[in-house]
Image (cartoon, rainbow, N blue to C red):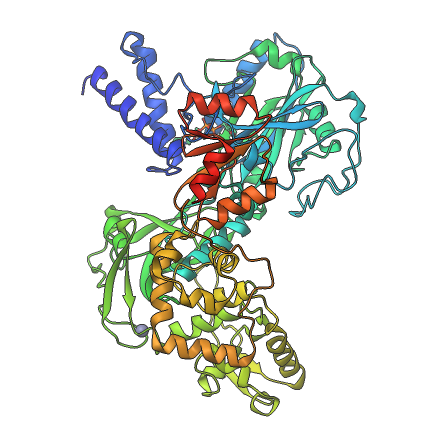
Amino acid sequence: MSPEARIQELTSQLNYYNDQYYQHSQSVVDDFTFDKLLEELQALESQHPNLKRPDSPTARVGGTISKEFATVYHRFPMLSLGNTYNETDLIEFDNRVRKGLNGEAYEYICEQKFDGVALSMTYENGILVQGATRGDGVRGDDITHNIRTIRTMPLKVGGREEGDEGEKREEGLSPSSSSSLFSPSSLPPLFEVRGEGFLPLAEFERINKEREDIGEPLLANPRNAASGAFKQQDSAAVAKRRLDCFIYSFLSDEPVFQTHEESLLTLAGWGFNISPTWRKCADIEAVKAYIAEWDTKRFTLPLNTDGIVIKVNRYDQQRELGYTAKSPRWAIAYKFKAAAAATTLNSITYQVGRTGAVTPVAHLSPVLLAGTVVKRASLHNANEIARLGVMLGDTVFVEKGGEIIPKITGVDLGKRPESAHAIAYPTECPACGTSLVRKEDDKGAAQAHFYCTNEKHCPPQRQARFEHFIQRRAMNIESLGEGKIELLIDRGLVEEPADLYDLTNEKLLGLEKTYPATSIVRADGTEEPGKARTVKFGQKTVDNILTAIERSKAQPFGNVLFAMGIRYVGSTTADRLVDYFGSLDALMAVPLETLAGVPDVGPRIAESAFAWFQDEDNRRYVERLRAAGLQLVSEKKVVALESDSLAGKTFLYTGTFANFSREAIEERIAANGGKLLSGVSKKLNFLIVGENAGPSKVAKAQQLNVPMLSEDEFIAMLG
Ligand SMILES: NC(=O)c1ccc[n+]([C@@H]2O[C@H](COP(=O)([O-])OP(=O)(O)OC[C@H]3O[C@@H](n4cnc5c(N)ncnc54)[C@H](O)[C@@H]3O)[C@@H](O)[C@H]2O)c1
Ligand SMILES: [Zn+2]
C-alpha cells in the first residue's frame, strides 16, 4: 500500500475509533492497538509531511463536544499526554527533559494515570461555578450540574462552613487529615482544578450485578460507564451513580505555587480529593522504581488505572519545556499493557442466572495474572464464543482489568492442538433440561443470550430469586446468605421467597449440611485440597435469621417492589414507580400507557411490569407477601399523576412565577408526566420563563431555538 493510501486509511480508522470512544463511550479496539496505529500514523506523517491530512488525529485531542450540553471554552487548553509502553522511551523522555533544561537540576512527580474522564472545575471566589469535560481540548461540555453531584468535590473552598465537605474520603485513599495546610485566605479569586472523574470499581460491580439481576445488558468497563454517566441529562440519576474524582492539577492566571508538589499538598489542605498515591522522585531511576512497584499494586486501588504519569515538578521548568500542539513536553504517561497471560481453555460450564440467561464460564489451566491465580474467565455469551473462534483445548489470552473475573481476549491459533474441538453450545438447560430459547435484547444480536424459560421451577433460577429477594437493596435478610438458602430449598422448607415468612424456630434449629470440598489450585498447577464446608443452624444463627426476617417487614415499599424480581425493574425504577403510584394496588390498577408515561420508565420496562402483574401465579405470590405483612404502600409523599398532558416533554424554568413556588412548578411538571432538565440543551423542549428570568438561559434557548413558554402558556398546556 502506498504511504498516501495508508495515511488516509489510518486517519479515517483512528478518527472512527476516537468518535466511538469519546462520543459513544465504546472501545472498538484496545488502547494498545489504538496507540500503535497512532504511532504508525505519526511516523508516516513525519516521513511525508505533505501527505498529512487536515483532519489528522495526531494533531488534535481526540474528543469533541456534544449538542446536548452548553459549550464552554477552556481558559487554558486541556491537552492529552504523550504516552509510551516501554522503558527506552522513558529514558528518551528523561534525556529530552535534561537537554531542554540545559543541565539545570530537576525532579519528577509520579502519579497514577487514573482511567476515567478528564474534568475541569472552575472556582470563583472559592465557589464552584463551572464543571466541564475536556471535549476537543479547546471547548468542552458544560456539565456543572453533574459535577456538583460528586460528593468529594468541594462546592466551596476557603471560609468553609461546617459540613461543607460532606461525606468525603470514604475510599480511604486520601490523607486522613484534611486540615488546612495553607491558609485558604491565599486563594486566588479565580482558579481551575483538573482531575479524573471515575466510577469506583465497587460501584461498577454493584451496578453490573444489578443489571444482570434485572436482565439488562452489562456496562463494558468502568471508564465507559463513567463517561456515559457524566453525560446524562438528569443529574438526579447521575447522583445515584456515586461518581468520584481525583484532582491532579491546578491552574490560575497568576502563578500561586512554585512546584506541582506544593500544589498537591495545598489542594489537599483546601479539601480537594487528592489520591495520596503520588510520589516525588529525584531521578528517572526512582521513577522506574515507582513504576515497578505499582505495576501490580494498582490492582488494590478502588478504581482502574492504566499507567503512571510522570511530571516535571517545578512550574518554571514546565514553562521552559513547553507544549506540542497536543501535549506537554514536561510530562509523559507510561502506560501498562493490560495485564495478560496465555493459558489453556480446558472446559466450559454453563451458569443459569435469575432471569434464566445462560452464561458460559471458561475453566482454564491456572495462570498467574497481576498477582493472582486465575482459573476462570468470562465468555459472556454464544456470540462472544463465535467472535473469538475459540475451541476447547486452545491456548487463549486472558486479560484482567480491575474487574473481578478476567476475560478471554483472543486465541493463539498457532498453538491450536490436533485434539482441539469446537464448543457445542447446549440446547437444553444444564440445570433442568428445558429447551433453551434464544432472545435478543435492544442491542440486537451482539448481546444475544440463550434462556431457560422454566422460570418457576429451574433450580438455579429459584435459588437466584431468593438471593435477589434477601439482598440489602431489597428485603435485607443477608444473614440467610452463604449456602443457607440452598439448604432450606434442599430440605423443602421454602419454595418461593414468600415462604420465608412461615419459617419458625422449630423448622430451622439443628438443620445441618456438609458441602463437599472444592480444591484450591496453585499457580504451578498443583492442587491443594480445600476444606469441606458445613452449614449449620445453631440457636444464634436461627435467632439472627428470624430477627432479620421479622425486621424485613418494615422495608419500604420500593424495596419490596424491587424484591419481587420483575425483569428490568431495578431498585431505582422501583422507587420511581413508588413515587408515582404510592401503593401496590394503585400500581396494579394502572393501564399500560400510564405506566409507560412515567419518566425514566418507558415502554420496555412498562410492558415487563404490566405483564408480570397480569400473571396469575405472580398475583397469588403478591397476595402472600401482603398476608405476611410487607409494606405495599409508600409513606413518602406521592406524586399523583394528574394527567399525561406533558408526557414525553422536557422542561426547565427560570425566574419567579405568580402562581407557583419553585417546588410547586416542579411538582406540576412531574404530576403531568413531564420531565425536568437541569440545563438548556438541544434535549430541552420548553423553557418556562418567569419574572427576572436568567439572561444566559434565555439567550442559550434562543440560540438553540428552544421554544419559550410564559407562565400562562404553561398553565394552558397543563389542560
Ligand atoms: N481503544 C480505543 O478505541 C481508543 C480510542 C481513543 C483513545 N483511546 C485511548 O485513549 C488515549 C488517548 O486519550 P487521551 O488523549 O485522553 O490521552 P491519555 O488518556 O493517554 O492522557 C491524557 C489524560 O490522562 C488523564 N489522566 C489520568 N490521570 C492523570 C494524572 N495523574 N495527571 C494528568 N492526567 C491524568 C487525563 O484525563 C488526561 O486528559 C489513547 O492513548 C488510547 O489508549 C483508545
Ligand atoms: Zn433451567
Query: Which quadrant of the view contains residue 177?
Result: top right
- The residue under the point 56% across, 35% down is 145
Residue 363 location in percent, x, y?
Answer: 36, 62
Q: Quadrant of ligand 2?
A: bottom left
| Side of 416 where 147 appears, left or right | right
As rendered, which of 580 and 254 lies closer to the eye?
580
Residue 198 location in percent, x, y?
Answer: 53, 40
Query: Which quadrant of the view contains residue 45?
Result: top left
Tell me, yes or no, if residue 625 can be seen here: yes
376, above or below 564, in the image? above
| Side of 206 where 682 appears, left or right | left
Residue 439 location in percent, x, y?
Answer: 25, 60
As rendered, which of 625 and 239 lies closer to the eye?
625
As rendered, which of 379 and 87 lies closer to the eye?
379
* Quarter that holds the N terminus: top left
- The residue under the point 33% across, 38% down is 28
450, above or below 659, in the image? below
* Quarter that holds the C terminus: top left
